[in-house]
Structures are given as C-alpha cells and as structure tokens.
Image (cartoon, rainbow, N blue to C red):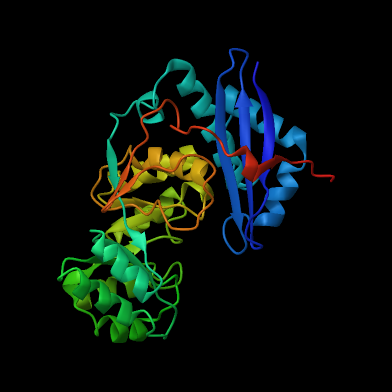
C-alpha cells in the first residue's frame, strides 16, 4: 500500500506555486515528485491548486498510474501528472536500489551537457572565468539589450562561447534578421522559438537566409506538431519542459523528435531540486547532441543540488531520482482549507 502527503513551498515567488508529493510504501521506501506552476505557463497556479486541493484527485491520479490507465492532459494539470509520475517512478526505482535512468531501461550517464542563463555583465564574466562556454540569453521583441551580453560572452571566452538566444515568440522576420545580423553567428548555438507558435514559414526563411540553427519550444506541444516541424524542415531541434508535459509525455515527445531526426533539449520551468532531478533523468535517456537547460541560480534548493561543472551537470549517484535529505524546513504540509 502506498501512502501520500502533499507539501507546499513555505516561501516562494508570488507568481509561482510549488508543491512536493511524497509517497511511502509499507517497506519504508519514499518517492518524491514536484509540481511547479508559473503564471502564464502550463496550467497556471490557479488550476494546479484547484486540482491538488481535492485529495480524491491525487488518489485517483495515483491509482490511474498504477493501473496504466491512459491520462488526458486536458483533464489533469501536467504539473500534477509530472509530480505523480516522478514520485511513483522514484519510489519504484528506490525499492530496487536502481537509479531512475537504469530503472527506465536506459544506460546511466555520468553527466549532462548544460547551458546557463546569463542575465547581466558581471554574471557573464564570472561564468566565463569559471570555464563555462554554453550560455543562454533572453531576447524580448525589438529590444537590443541582450546584444552587448552576447559580445561580452564571446570575447570573455576568446571566441569559444556557444550561445542560445530565446526570443519567446517575440520576433517577426524583419526583427530577427536585423538583430541576428549584428552577431558573430559562429558563436550562435541556435535561436529558440523566434516567432509565434505555428509560424513555421518564417522559421524556414530565417534558417535559409542566415544559415542558422533553430529550436522550437512552445510550438512543439505534441507529436503532430513535432512531425510537422520535421516534415517542413523548419527547425533542427525541439525544447521540452517535462513539468509541462508529464514525465512519460516528455519522453514520448523526445522519442518522436529523435525518430524524425530532430535534436532535443530538456529544460526546467523554474522547478526546485526535485523537479529538476526528474527532468535530468529524462534528459539522460536522450541522444546527447545538444546541451540541456537544467540549472539556474536562485531556484528552490529543496534537497542536495546536483554538482555543476563547466558546461556539465553531474548526474546524482543515489537510487531513484538521486535526492537526499529533503529540506523539510522549506516545505510544510498543505491543507487547502487553511
């Protein structure tokens, strides 16, 4: 018999809600999963809290997963599904003494290539000095504010930087060509979601005009979208956030991408340690052609963080998700009525 408990972040960002689902079996094994909702992304905090506030929803979700019943994401917040899947897999893998990657049937990896988000000049120079070479910058519409950071990273690494630029759907074709035309393109790893979801024509035109690599994030929401991206040669890789897809759903999308000769980058969605450890194990099942995005400063450290080395995140060595010593001081049992 499996018992469950829902914990909530004690202190979190106003725009986010974070929960940890803790399972325990009769043998004393524990499994953890995390659900993190951010306003404007995924199902959002209101829908996630409404679902988790009803204990019968969690019990029913866990029962469906145990029975292998198909689960539709239009009926269950993906963040809740991700937490439940992660916790159940963690529990099962720990019971056998295996790490989750091995338990899922894949060879374990000692580390994952990783890119780091850079937000200011001081951080850019510090990371370059520490030996990091894979970076991410956020671009916002017509603003050229990120262009100096690109150049700082390029010069601080003696031209060795590989920089992904995430436009978050904020460009049109003219803006993209104008801004990217100011870069040393040999240091551009790829442009992520440059145009609004569905505008694959502009993606293809931009690829052909500048000879650059393009990644699709929000536009890679399901198998059909990924197959269309590949069929139209509109991008070279897709970005998948397990928190917004569910653990099994993220692996399914990744397998679809790889079957269609697209690369895969797995990223977090401001998850705490437990969510990112689960996402790391998803990433470990994927052909490592592209750096992932599974660490950023300031994220909730709910357990011992995986070690970060230049351009690498080291996989944990423990069983299941590899967590140890859950930070109960940062969490509290959640009573939806309190």
Q: Is residue 184 visible?
A: yes
- Compared with 108, 255 (above or below) is below
Q: Is residue 256 left or right of residue 154?
A: right
Q: Residue at x 54, y 51 (%)?
A: 300
- Point out the residue furthest to the top here: 27
Q: Residue at x 21, y 78 (%)?
A: 209
Instruction: Judge by depth and name the residue closer to the eye, 248 or 142.
Output: 142
Q: Is residue 165 visible?
A: no
Q: Residue at x 31, y 84 (%)?
A: 179
Instruction: Judge by depth and name the residue closer to the eye, 110 or 202.
Output: 110
Quadrant in which the N terminus appears: top right
Q: Is residue 297 left or right of residue 290?
A: right
Q: Position of residue 157 (x, y in %)?
A: 19, 68
- Compared with 98, 334 (above or below) is below
Q: Is residue 255 left or right of residue 157?
A: right
- Point out the residue furthest to the right here: 337
Q: Position of residue 247 (x, y in %)?
A: 48, 39
Q: Is residue 53 left or right of residue 119?
A: right
Q: Residue at x 36, y 68 (%)?
A: 123
Q: Position of residue 106 (x, y in %)?
A: 31, 29
Count up the numbered dots. 0
Q: Position of residue 295 (x, y in %)?
A: 41, 53
Q: Tell me where residue 22 sits by quadrant.
A: top right
């Amino acid at each position: 018999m499996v018992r469950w408990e829902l914990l909530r972040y004690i202190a979190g960002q106003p725009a986010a809600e974070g929960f940890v689902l803790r399972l325990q079996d009769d043998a004393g094994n524990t499994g953890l999963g995390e659900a993190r909702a951010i306003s404007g992304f995924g199902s959002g905090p209101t829908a996630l809290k409404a679902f988790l506030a009803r204990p019968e929803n969690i019990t029913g979700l866990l029962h469906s997963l145990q029975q292998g019943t198909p689960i539709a994401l239009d009926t269950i917040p993906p963040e809740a599904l991700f937490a439940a899947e992660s916790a159940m897999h963690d529990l099962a893998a720990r019971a056998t003494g295996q790490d989750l990657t091995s338990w899922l049937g894949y060879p374990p990896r000692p580390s994952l290539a990783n890119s780091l988000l850079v937000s200011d000049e001081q951080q850019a120079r510090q990371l370059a000095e520490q030996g990091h070479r894979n970076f991410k910058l956020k671009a916002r519409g017509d603003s050229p504010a990120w262009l100096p950071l690109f150049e700082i990273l390029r010069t601080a690494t003696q031209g060795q930087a590989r920089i992904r630029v995430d436009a978050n759907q904020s460009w049109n074709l003219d803006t993209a060509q104008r801004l990217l035309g100011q870069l040393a393109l040999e240091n551009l790893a790829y442009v992520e979601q440059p145009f609004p979801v569905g505008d694959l024509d502009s993606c293809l035109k931009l690829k052909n005009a500048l000879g650059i690599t393009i990644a699709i994030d929000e536009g890679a929401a399901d198998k059909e979208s990924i197959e269309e991206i590949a069929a139209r040669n509109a991008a070279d890789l897709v970005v998948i956030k397990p928190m917004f897809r569910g653990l099994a759903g993220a692996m399914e999308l990744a397998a679809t991408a790889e079957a269609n000769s697209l690369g895969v980058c797995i990223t977090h969605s401001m998850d705490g340690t437990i969510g990112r450890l689960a996402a790391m194990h998803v990433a470990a099942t994927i052909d490592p052609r592209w750096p992932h995005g599974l660490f950023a400063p300031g994220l909730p450290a709910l357990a011992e963080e995986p070690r970060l080395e230049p351009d690498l995140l080291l996989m944990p060595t423990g069983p299941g998700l590899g967590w140890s010593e859950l930070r109960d001081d940062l969490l509290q049992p959640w009573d939806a009525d309190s």
